[in-house]
Amino acid sequence: MYKYNFKKRIVYLGLFIFLFLIFFLIGTSVSFDKTTSELLKEQFQNKIKNIDSMGIFVNNFLISILMFVPGIGIAFGLFSGFSTGNIFMIITRGLPTQVPPLLVFLTIFGIMELVSYGIAISRSYLLLIHVLKRSRIKENLIHTAIEIGIVAIILLFSAIIEWDLIRHSAGINLLK
């Protein structure tokens, strides 16, 4: 009988959270010319225009679902970290004070999203390994389904918290 190794699962989770953060930081170090920055900022503004907690949830959940795909999910997840870092720097570039990039992950919703993405990316890795070995695929698919449910719940609560924070800080508009 297959025994779930929780300690090993936590190690993979931590590893892929760390890698996501590394790619996020790499993304913050890439600079764009003014025209490209303005175009990316405008596209981001259009994407989040009229968004609410359900919109935040759907966006984050769809991103996380792609991260569960064996192998491809790893690349997509790390690219997501990189592009999030890009957008973070574009949005915060014009602020009067420099905002430390990792500050966003010290918020409760930032931590929740980071854990969710770490779960998804690390499961992508584990699925890939088991598919290549052709072993325990059924058990891994069951664990994947459970983890997708866990990620959905975490991201739902994260979106509610994030939206509440956005609503209560309505006077602060970082996207101007």
Image (cartoon, rainbow, N blue to C red):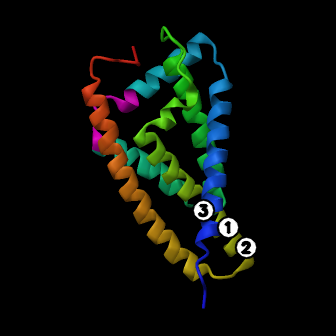
Which one is in front, 170 or 145? 170
**Which of these two is toward me, 63 or 119?**
119
In percent of the image, x 64 and y 56: which residue is there?
72
Label annotation for residue 20: none
Q: CA distance from mark 2 to mark 1?
A: 6 Å
Can I make out residue 159 in this image?
A: yes
User: Which percent across, then down, holds residue 39?
Assistant: 51, 19
Left or right, 148 with reference to 133: left
Element under disc 3: helix
Residue type at mark 1: give it.
Leu
Q: Quadrant for the C terminus, please.
A: top left
Q: Is label 2 in contact with label 1 (beta carbons under 8 Å)?
A: yes
To which residue does mark 3 refer?
10
Which region shows up in magenta?
A: 46-53
- Measured as percent of width and height from the top left, residue 154 is found at 39, 54
Q: Is residue 49 magenta?
A: yes
Q: N-terminal of the two: label 3 or label 2?
A: 3
Q: Is residue 30 magenta?
A: no
Q: Which residue is mark 1?
A: 128
Which residue was labeled with disc 2? 132
What's under tag 3, amino acid-wise?
A: Ile
Dot 2: few (<14), some (14–19), or many (≥20) neighbours within 10 Å? few
Which of the 4 quarters of the picture holds residue 102? top right
